[in-house]
Image (tube, rainbow, N blue to C red):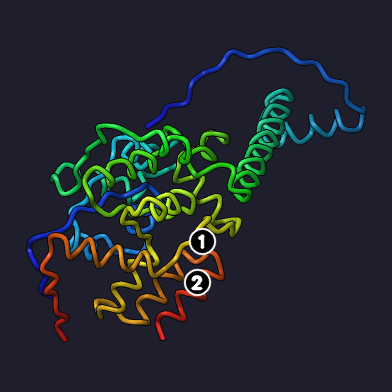
Amino acid sequence: MSSQKSETMKVKTLRLKDSVSSLITTIAKEKNLSDSEYIRSLVEKDIFKFKINKAINAYKKREINISKGAKIIGVSYREFLDILEERAVPLNMDDFPIDYGLASIEKSLSLTVKNKFKKNK
Amino acid sequence: MNYSTKKSLAILDTSFYIHLVKIDLIDIFLNFYKIIVCSKVKEEITYFTHRDLYLPRDIELFLKLKKSDIIRIENPIKISKSLISEISSDSGEMYAIALAQEKNSIVFIDNGRPYKYCLKNKILCSNIVEFLLYLYKNKVITKREILNKIKIIENTLPKEYLLETYSKMD
């Protein structure tokens, strides 16, 4: 289980159009944030989106698995699974031969189980 | 339902366990199998971030089952070179497959590439859809139940694969 680590911050300067700059101040005020806090949140959100798209594309191309995708974005395994589900990205299961899986279950149960279950009606 | 008290071992990967809890099948699964997970899978299951407002239900259940020794943690003694080269290293699925190989047990994985490795190396392997299908074929759950459960996770399942599954139910 993780905790949020505090990171050191670096200063980056940027030039903005007057209109955009005053809009940032207006929106930041409405959100009860300073200009820099608001700009920082915008940048962080976009980086997060970028990482998500990168991980999803790599997963779709079968270059990475779920664990790796989660690491790229910086989320838990469960969160990446949720992200895939929300975006209707199916798990890479299409090459599964169903009969092999069924036979595996039957064989595994016959190894130690007498397999005498009966359904009560 | 009467089951034998002697159960087989099943090694679970993270996504299979999460799906199993999500579609409320853990009790039925435990009627068939004793669950073993590797430390890496345990780590993947129990890791959650500050974005989660509540402890996810599957984590809560996992910790409870582990405490009661219903879920055991075990790790493979060694991992073959071919497994390391074919499966993402340091992933839960790699350890799960290695352990299944050592214990001659079945591994449940909901992901394609590791599954293919199992197929190639004759390791018993299955996934959540096949487990549902097995239950249906053995009259443990009804067709309506299987369809309702699939509906919960259908966004994560490839359409063609689902169609093939449905065709096996007729």
| In-image side of A17 versus B84 (left or right) | right
**C-alpha separation, residue under disc 1 versus residue under disc 2:** 12 Å
In the rendered image, which quarter contains the N terminus of chain B? bottom left
Residue behind mark 2? B162
Q: Relative to A114, say whether A26 is above or below.
A: above
Residue type of the residue flagged with mark 2: Leu
Residue type of the residue flagged with mark 1: Asp
| Chain for numbered disc 1 | A
**Residue B154 picture location, percent across and down:** 49, 66
**Residue B122 picture location, percent across and down:** 34, 54
Task: Determine the secondary structure under disc 1.
Answer: loop
Q: Residue at x 68, y 36 (%)?
A: A31
**Residue B139 picture location, percent across and down:** 25, 80
Q: Residues within 10 Å of mark 1 (few under 14, many from 20)?
A: some
Q: Residue at x 46, y 79 (%)?
A: B166
Name the foreground residue: B132 vs B115: B115
Q: Which mark is residue B125?
A: none
Q: Residue at x 32, y 45 (%)?
A: B59
Q: Which mark is residue A95?
A: 1
| In-image side of B84 versus A16 (left or right) | left
- When asked about the image quadrant of residue A116, the answer is bottom left
Task: Report the residue that reaches farthest toward the right.
Answer: A18
